Amino acid sequence: MKTLVNLVLLCLFSTMVLAQEKPVKIVFDVTSNNAKVHESAMRHMKMMAKAYPDSKFEMVMYSGAYGMVVKGESTVSEDMEALAKNKNVDFVVCQASLNRHKVEASQLVAGVRAVPDGILEIIQKQEKGWGYIKEGQ
């Protein structure tokens, strides 16, 4: 019983310490067409957004990842739509990638917006102090 109490106290202390940290801003870079990478990226985004509600998170998808945001093709569309409703989460896709693959705005998963260039979006976030995570396998 004492071990269980200690474990509960440790969890509560850890939660309090994490809750007191300075908010962060993180951009996730996804270029893979692999559904496992998409699922992993969404899992990371979901966990981070929940653990750090005062922080900001943006997932930038381009190149082969364009299918991640297309209705009927995406394996993560339901999670993405739900998570996009959070005020601290943003999903963006590269318009150049959409153009190259002839994807129209009406085909995008709800909550996703297009930016002119995915790479430029990431660079601009980094210039503003955002942390960077490359999602891949």
Image (cartoon, rainbow, N blue to C red):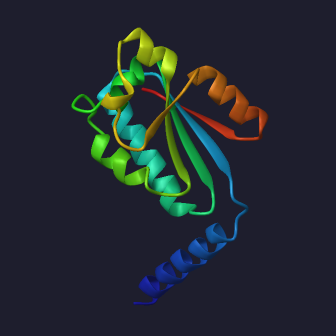
Residue at 35% from the left image edge and 13% from the top image edge: 102
Q: Residue furthest bottom?
A: 1
- Rendered-image quadrant of the N terminus: bottom left
Q: Residue furthest top?
A: 100
Residue at 57% from the left image edge and 47% from the top image edge: 57
25 relative position to 52: left or right: right
18 relative position to 65: left or right: right
Residue at 61% from the left image edge and 51% from the top image edge: 56
Task: In this rendered view, identify the residue nearer to me: 90 or 17.
Answer: 90
The picture places residue 17, in percent across and down from the top left corner, at 66, 71
- Rendered-image quadrant of the C terminus: top left
Q: Is residue 47 above or below residue 66?
A: below
Q: Is residue 133 above or below residue 47?
A: above
Residue 54, by quadrant, is bottom right
Task: In this rendered view, identify the residue nearer to me: 93 or 27.
Answer: 93
Count up the numbered dots: 0
The picture places residue 92, in percent across and down from the top left corner, at 50, 34
Q: Is residue 113 above or below residue 21?
A: above
Residue at 69% from the left image edge and 59% from the top image edge: 23
The picture places residue 6, in percent across and down from the top left corner, at 51, 83
Residue 100, by quadrant, is top left
Residue 120, by quadrant, is top right
